[in-house]
Image (tube, helix red, strand yellow):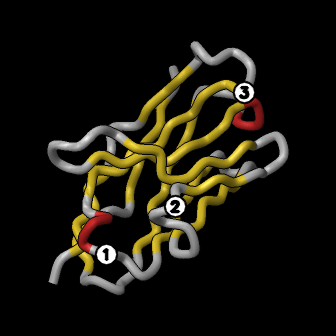
Amino acid sequence: QVQLVESGGGLVQPGGSLRLSCAVSGITFSSYTMTWYRQAPDKAREEVARITNSGGTTTYADSVKGRFTISTDNAKNMIYLQMNNLRPEDTAVYYCNARHSRLAWYNYWGQGTQVTVSS
């Protein structure tokens, strides 16, 4: 059974930092591309950051470049999103996603974790 479980969300003041974690089980971690998405109220889900486990190539949305960093710990099957200099517009539910690098129908989601940036 495939499971992705996010943690680390919460309330933080503008300019603050949070680190999100996603524990992955039930898949061959190294065969998947890992992505963090977010969805704000009344907005479409958007891709935030992606990392290919095959080579570790990272991609970021323009809105988070220079502030967010995606990383993985292959030994622990963990995905992380370090978020610095947070802004109110970063408020959203954040989801981790695992999609097989070749067989795209193997596509899995976590349940999401709420991040609220407010003073």
What amino acid type is highlighted by mark number 2?
Asp
Residue 87 shows which numbered tag? 1
Check contact, mark 3 vs mark 1: CB within 8 A.
no
User: Quadrant location of the C terminus?
Assistant: bottom left
The residue positioned 38% from the left and 56% from the top of the image is: 7
Residue 101 shows which numbered tag? 3
User: Residue 116's image quarter?
Assistant: bottom left
What amino acid type is highlighted by mark number 1?
Arg
Mark nearer the N terminus (3 vs 1):
1
The residue positioned 61% from the left and 41% from the top of the image is: 34
Q: Which numbered mark, 1 or 2, is in the foreground of this view?
A: 2
Q: CA distance from mark 1 to mark 2?
A: 14 Å
Q: CA distance from mark 3 to mark 2?
A: 23 Å
User: Residue 32's image quarter?
Assistant: top right
Residue 109, x across and y down, in percent: 44, 32
| Horizontal side, residue 87 vs residue 105: left or right | left
Mark nearer the N terminus (1 vs 2):
2
Q: Which numbered mark, 3 or 2, is in the foreground of this view?
A: 2
| Horizontal side, residue 42 vs residue 52: left or right | left
What amino acid type is highlighted by mark number 3?
Ser
Residue 29, x across and y down, in percent: 70, 36
The residue positioned 75% from the left and 43% from the top of the image is: 53
Q: Is residue 35 above or below residue 49?
A: above
Dot 3: what SS? Answer: loop
Check contact, mark 3 vs mark 2: CB within 8 A.
no
Q: Which residue is mark 2?
A: 62
Q: Is residue 103 above or below residue 3?
A: above
Q: CA distance from mark 3 to mark 1?
A: 32 Å
Residue 99 shows which numbered tag? none
